[in-house]
Amino acid sequence: MSDYTPLSELGEFGLIKRIKEKFELRNASSVKGIGDDAAVLEPQEKQLVVTSDMLLESVHFDLTFCPLKHLGYKAVAVNVSDIAAMNAKPTQITVNIGLGARFTVEAVEELYEGIRLACENYNVDLIGGDTTSSRAGLVISVTAIGEVAKGEAVLRSGAQVNDLVCVTGDLGAAYLGLQVLEREKQAFMANPDMQPELENKQYIVGRQLRPEARMDVVYELKELGIKPTSMIDISDGLASELMHICSQSGVGATVYKDNLPADGQMLETAVEFNLDPITCIMNGGEDYELLFTIPLSDHDKVKNHPDITIIGKITEASEGVNIANKHGQAFPLKAQGWSHF
Amino acid sequence: MSDYTPLSELGEFGLIKRIKEKFELRNASSVKGIGDDAAVLEPQEKQLVVTSDMLLESVHFDLTFCPLKHLGYKAVAVNVSDIAAMNAKPTQITVNIGLGARFTVEAVEELYEGIRLACENYNVDLIGGDTTSSRAGLVISVTAIGEVAKGEAVLRSGAQVNDLVCVTGDLGAAYLGLQVLEREKQAFMANPDMQPELENKQYIVGRQLRPEARMDVVYELKELGIKPTSMIDISDGLASELMHICSQSGVGATVYKDNLPADGQMLETAVEFNLDPITCIMNGGEDYELLFTIPLSDHDKVKNHPDITIIGKITEASEGVNIANKHGQAFPLKAQGWSHF
């Protein structure tokens, strides 16, 4: 352990200085970043969107299988995902971190390297935050700010009857990735000499450990001339998110079981774990894909898009929120969602 | 305990709904608050300032003597204090909270009642955040946003040679309040039947448990036609904050021991604890007063202000940062500051 530097040797100001050196400001609206009582922004005539999410050790992540670099990346990505779901462009983040005494300078730098990579990929500026010790586990709290032209923000509440319901990417993989990681952890604890069996699980494990916010699709929809009528990101599971859109828009919806986008590795693994793949897709969560609705007239613009799948349609509120099979039978959706308490 | 509601009975969405009902939006720039993937702001032509701070149980507060309502208030106030130090007006906050399973709905409501009171006092809108469970202690992470006209933000870096160094209020009391609370906690643990001895300690204990951000002084300086050349809030201690101003402004400073503002209860308690009052003032921290510099020409505007004390002057960098006694002897300042690691 002699190659590692204890945090106490560097101190808080030393740590902040070291972090600051590795981050640059990319956005014109970031007038002043780290280094004063607060950062200064100049959003000009834009509207801003603001979101904040906190990840806690043993609740949201398990350091026995989650590399710190991925965790740093994920903490940013899940917040950018909320910015994407507003149809906005992320511009700034603040990051508060609580670190246990066992953390070395090198470990903290790994974490910030993941944060830096995410800032680079999403073109976001780290403008401030707080680094403190924690008597408990690792705590990461991120606030993300984004910009959107006035009138361009997309809320959950704008879905209209007859709109198409679309999702990006595929669903359920992050949940099954977590099942695999948990299984390997149990096996490792029973026998520390074993090597984790992650062959043919790379995709789903990657979906769990290092999700991406779908900013690419936000930009592509703009290029296609499509403004979604409503949008939400899928953190808790498709069923729960669809219910948010329906209740806030005052509409119903039907999604078609056969249209739900699934990855092959996810399907195989569901069978292996004796889980219903549709349940994993509907309630798995943590996929950080986008669920959105568009006018029927935009159908042709998305029908062949490789990253967008039309999974259903918006109906009258009185019809409820349903999932239909190929025989046309519809069943009311249940949001198992997630309950932390 | 049957009068208390476990959090699991309400669930996360139920809790958010209950919180949301108690908060209203006051600022024109808050277009949409809680309830979507992100809040929407419209700052118009203003610049924004953004700051974020996290409070962790057993590191920043001790629930054995810190009432939840005060804690909620403090979590907002310490962030507003950073906004004040930028010469800005606070407008929005996001609050992320991690709660242990032992928390009841009633306890969470106490915490949010403190947050609500602070929002009311500082005219701030709660626009979002995250409520999650914590396996560790209570975690509160707040991000505050403020508005300032372009060119009106005050940084740490603008102090000029010959400027006056000023502070608001009095210093050292929050630190001694904490010493009293710690002593009473030890006494209580040794003998749970004892009653805490807080007579004649109300002021200093209040300074520790429920500090106020000095927005009043920010508004008064504006009315007096004074724009500080530099400003910082005193969270870590006067010595440490003065050194930040000096190093970022490229100047030195001398403060006069006899000019340092001290409260009588603080002085008495320092003697009682066998502590040097000057050390408590210089390094105690957590007072959340403002330290700022103004041009010498503004001297008459502040000299009789009841909440502002002129404690020294800015010098050439080569003279260093010193504390002088009444005989004119100067000693280099040491920032003991605070080190969490």
Image (cartoon, coloured by chain):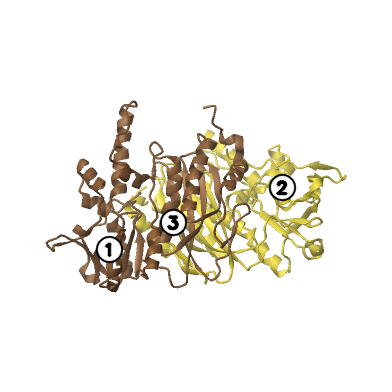
Chain colours: A brown, B yellow
Question: As rendered, which of B121 and B250 lies closer to the eye?
Answer: B250
Residue mark closest to the camera, 1 vs 2: 1
Q: Is residue B165 left or right of residue A99?
A: right
Per the image, the residue denoted by label 1 is A304
Q: Please, what is the three-letter code of the amino acid marked with disc 1?
A: Asn
- Label 3 – label 1 distance at C-alpha: 26 Å
Per the image, the residue denoted by label 3 is A80
Question: As rendered, which of B204 and A61 lies closer to the eye?
Answer: A61
Chain letter for mark 3: A
Residue at disc 3, secondary structure: helix
Residue at disc 1, secondary structure: loop
Q: Is residue B170 left or right of residue B50?
A: right
Per the image, the residue denoted by label 2 is B243
Disc 2 packing (10 Å; few <14; some 14–19; many ≥20): many
- Please tell me which residue is depicted at 31% across the width and 33% down the height of the picture: A186
Q: Are marks 3 and 1 on the same chain?
A: yes
Labels 2 and 3 touching (C-beta < 8 A): no
Disc 3 packing (10 Å; few <14; some 14–19; many ≥20): many
Q: Is residue A335 visible?
A: yes
Q: Are marks 1 and 2 on the same chain?
A: no
Which tag, 3 or 1, sits closer to the chain's start? 3
Chain letter for mark 2: B
